[in-house]
Amino acid sequence: MSSKTTVWSRTHDSTSSEEMPRRLFYFTIGGISAWGFFLATIVSAYTATWQLKGYELMLFGLILPFLGLFISARSGSALLSLVGYHLIVVPLAALLGPGLASFEIADPGIVSSVAFLTGAVTLVMATSGLLYPNFYRSIGGFLFAGIFGLLTVLVAGLFVPAVREFAPIHYFAAGLFALYIGWDMWRASELPPTLNNAVDVSVALYLDILNLFLHMLSILGVGGKD
């Protein structure tokens, strides 16, 4: 498999010897994604009391995750893609540890409750991506416009805190990333069922689910109390 293509452009880039049964492909995606969140739970608990410095924020929040994205996107090897996946999962979990601890102190049990709810939404949306391909095939433009608008608002929120704290933004973002889960599963159904593709799809799904979790946590942990 070519290392010069991203996962979503590999619709015909495989050999029969590399492929696994389609159902096993989906279970592999689910297993890798679940492993990522299990590992993230352990790492974030370990870093709950960290006081991160500026260079650590840069390292864990940008440098290592972007390196992981680059490796997984450009690699033709499932092993290298797994390395990239862990370079995303572990640093982001370390970065989130102190923030999740703050939510838990303010409202004991909120993190696990939101995690359970996120898992339920993920299961429903991932299944819908496989059951309703025509719907997801038609909403790509809306999703791209939505993510562009969300990023614009979040950047504005860096300079105007009131924008960042505007509760409807989190509702919109949660809905958007829920749709992205379904969309990415639909796109996965169009790919050859190889191990490398399963790992790379898991990268995309992990980021979708993580964003869904964080925005739902903002809704239920902050907005839900207002």
Image (cartoon, rainbow, N blue to C red):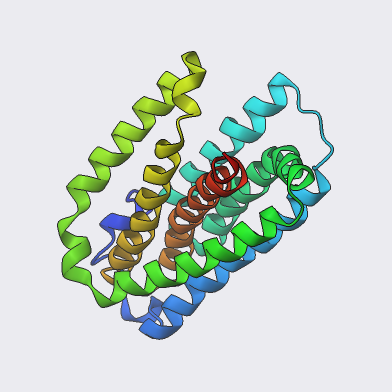
Number of numbered callouts drawn: 0
**Residue 37 drawn above or below residue 51:** below
Q: Nearer the viewer, residue 51 or 2?
A: 51
Q: Would residue 162 be found to the left or right of residue 92 on screen?
A: left
**What residue is drawn where x is 49% and y is 56%?**
209
Q: Would residue 68 be found to the left or right of residue 204 on screen?
A: right
Q: Would residue 24 be found to the left or right of residue 210 on screen?
A: left
Q: Quadrant of the N terminus?
A: bottom left
Q: Is residue 192 visible?
A: no
Point out residue 95 in the picture as x, y percentages from the top left corner. 68, 38
Point out residue 128 in the picture as x, y percentages from the top left corner. 32, 72
Q: Quadrant of residue 48?
A: top right
**Residue 2 drawn above or below residue 164:** below
Q: Nearer the viewer, residue 156 or 4?
A: 156
Q: Quadrant of the C terminus?
A: top right
Q: Quadrant of residue 127?
A: bottom left
Q: Nearer the viewer, residue 208 or 193?
A: 208
Q: Is residue 178 visible?
A: yes
**Residue 185 drawn above or below residue 95:** below
**What residue is drawn where x is 51% and y is 45%?**
215
**Residue 141 drawn above or below residue 51:** below
Point out residue 107 in the picture as x, y percentages from the top left corner. 73, 48
**What residue is drawn where x is 18% and y is 65%?**
135
Point out residue 32 in the picture as x, y percentages from the top left corner. 56, 67
**What residue is drawn where x is 67% and y is 27%?**
57
Q: Residue lying furthest front in this view?
A: 226
